Image (spheres, rainbow, N blue to C red):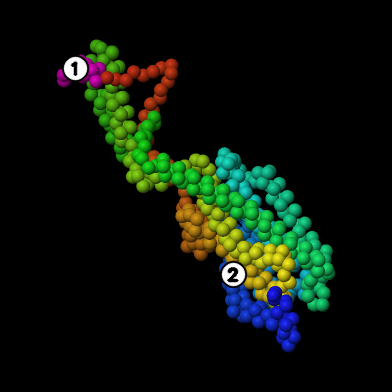
Amino acid sequence: MNLSDTAHQNPDNPRPYAYLYENLCVYFLGWYLPTTIIVGAMGTLFSLFFLFCSKLFKSNMLIWLSSICIGDFLILMLEGLWILLKVWFKYDIRDQNDVICVLHKAASNYAIYWSAYMQCALSVERAYLVFKPLHARVQGGVSKRHAITWIIISLLLITPVMPYMIYWRVIDGDCDPTDRAIFYLTTVTDLIVWGIVPLLGMTVATVVICLNMARVGKKFNKSTAYPQKWTRKHSTITGSDSTGVEKRRGLSISALPISSSKSNPDIHTLSTRTMTHLDATNLANTRVELTHAKLQRQLTEQSSSRHNAQDNFGHVTRLLVCMNVAYMTSTFPLLIYLMYRNFSGVDVDPDVHRFFYYMCRSLCFLNSCTNWIFYCLVGKLFRAEAKHILLMCCGMRSTKSARGYSSPLENVLAPVQGIPTPTVTQHVCPGKRTRSISAAEIQRVVSAIPPR
């Protein structure tokens, strides 16, 4: 027994399920819609400001992320305000005339499609970079491939909204299609174009990205399980140690009597090589020492920067995974309901359909109003920059960001300004091989030096 049969069994009450939609409006949509619209609109505007002011993203990622924010803002302004006016004031803006009916219906559905496919395109690109990681090193402006893909997606999405422009009119005070078969066609189109295709793409891309992140993390944990031996061909001393080395080198060389160098040139040459070798060994042994925890953290960030220099240490990947999970969670109820309504063969009561449709459609706004939160949750770098932008907007900080773009390891080993940094380099040249100095040679040199 379906719901329509139950309705026909009560002739005294032609709308036995009208209370479902009325209670939904009073107890849920009345406060839920304004909250999501206000929070989502402010959040998407902040996300756009963050994307363009933080300078953390390359142009090829910026085109997708900014499109997602613009699409979410349009969804809230078109679809969200339309439902809010119906709930609060019983006013349907689409029922005014044919022009508003067609334009609003087509524009709101196009914004929903466009935002979904922009996010799906970014997901597919990030999944592709798992197999082609070197392609992430492309710098500069928006590439020709990305621009063409963006234009093609934007133009192709006009096709599923064409039925709204052709067949939707104001009939008996309601914005409805001229033929009920067209209504069924557009419902199936929403299910496939808006639901199944982008949801499938995001799901596959998210699984690929998560498996790759787990594999890389497991591999890194194995590589850092045991201490590694570090070999250095270039030793650099910074700070006050460099002055002491220069003094020791000068005293060591000047301590040799001039007469001995004149009488025996071989002794002078050997002694010079000996002291140079000792100074080089001292330089190599006085390098900066790092704790295990700090070294592991810096190696993680340096590895991410080395393999994907423009990925901001994986922040964008984690951001995308969070956005995909939020999208799949918020759209899954409406997807299930549309599949049930179109393929079950059950004639759903109009009031029951209105209840489930507006409840599931309003849940989709969670994706549009929560994406900005993920910018602050995926990493410390994004949180620091977001805090800086907020303080800058409030006039509490200058426009110049205090954030550095160099890697943390470079900041630790950076030379002090104003102090020359001596660098000892040990090169192994095939044509000219330097023989190592033995202990016997050092003893012979010392014994050959006359007493003072």
User: On the picture, is 330 further left or further right than 409?
Assistant: right
How many marks the image carries: the answer is: 2
- Left/right of residue 436 with respect to residue 92 in the rendered view: left
Q: Nearer the viewer, residue 357 or 426?
A: 357
Q: Is residue 167 left or right of residue 215?
A: right
Q: Earlier in the sequence, mark 2 or mark 1?
A: 2
Say what secondary structure mark 1 lies in. Answer: helix
Label number found at residue 36: 2
Please identify, in this view, whether the residue under mark 2 or under mark 1 is nearer the observer. 2
Q: Which residue is mark 1?
A: 447
Q: Residue 200: where, in percent of width, then height?
A: 64, 54
> Label 1: few (<14), some or many (≥20) within 10 Å?
few
Q: Give left or right: position of 113 versus 239.
A: right
Q: Is residue 428 above or below residue 284?
A: above
Front in this rendered view, residue 243 or 32: 32
Query: SS at mark 2?
Result: helix
* Quarter of the figure with residue 133: top right
Q: Which mark is residue 97?
A: none
- Amino acid type at image mark 1: Ser
Residue under the image location 16 percent in, 20 percent down = 452
Which residues make up the magenta segment?
439-452
Residue 442 part of the magenta-drawn span: yes
**Rendered location of residue 304, percent (x, y):** 49, 44
State the residue at coordinates (68%, 55%).
197
Residue kind at label 2, given as amino acid type: Thr
Res. 202 image quadrant: bottom right
- Magenta stretch holds residue 139: no
Q: Position of residue 228 (x, y in %)?
A: 36, 37
